[in-house]
Image (cartoon, helix red, strand yellow):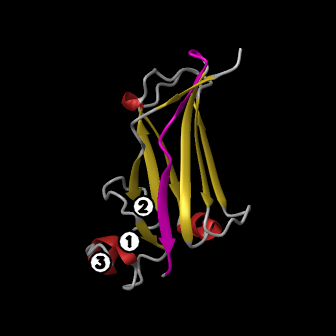
Amino acid sequence: MPFRYKLLSIEPDYYYSDFFQDALEDHVGFDHKDPLNVAYTLYNKPYARFQYHGGFSLIVSVGMLPVNPQAGDTWNVDMQNITTGNPSAIFNHMSTVHPGTAPQYFATGVSIRPGMYTLGPGIIEIESFFTSNATNTVYVFPTKQLTLVMP
């Protein structure tokens, strides 16, 4: 039986770095130690704290999902640079629920190297979905776009 698809109205939470403290803005710079980074020039973030951040991350609380994850279910994240159209400018992540576990959340981090440099500067489209084998359903999160900018 083929999977059904359901669009969700909720989206993963996006953060600077993997500290899961500072919500991500629409533009992300590559080097947080550079005072010309958009975190400082566009969003007035405090350099003293942000200089130690690196990359960005996504997290989905299990409580946000319409079903409880079961063994074999997966959470997938696919990112691509839609500005360049370069087929190698991608980032993929998959988390699988293992037997005997009860995850509280699913998360992935995109490090500066190689993650952000692989994607490159430009508009990044982020797609994510949760596949439930028990309900035979793929739950699709809204697509997100953010812009990676130099420096």
Q: Nearer the viewer, mark 1 or mark 2?
A: 2
Q: Position of residue 131 (x, y in %)?
A: 58, 28
Secondary structure under tag 2 reads loop
Instruction: Work out whether mark 3 precedes mark 2 in sequence or the reverse, and give the earlier one.
Output: 2
Contact? badges 1 and 2 (CB < 8 Å) = yes
Amino acid of disc 2: Ser
Q: Label 1 crowding class (10 Å Cα cut-off): few <14, some 14-19, many 20+?
A: few
Give the CA separation, mark 3 to mark 2.
Answer: 14 Å
Secondary structure under tag 1 reads loop
Amino acid of disc 3: Tyr
Tell me the residue at 51%/25% (across/down): 101
Q: Position of residue 6 (x, y in %)?
A: 52, 27
User: Label 2: which residue?
Assistant: 17
Total marks placed: 3
Residue 77 is inside the magenta segment:
no
Please state the extent of the stretch shown in magenta in the rendering. 134-150
Instruction: Work out whether mark 1 precedes mark 2 in sequence or the reverse, and give the earlier one.
Output: 2
Tell me the residue at 38%/71% (across/down): 52
Q: Label 2 crowding class (10 Å Cα cut-off): few <14, some 14-19, many 20+?
A: many
Side (left or right) of 2 relative to 8: right
Q: Position of residue 24 (x, y in %)?
A: 37, 60
Above or below 128: residue 40:
below
Residue 140 is inside the magenta segment:
yes
Number of the label disc, if any, that sits on residue 52: 1
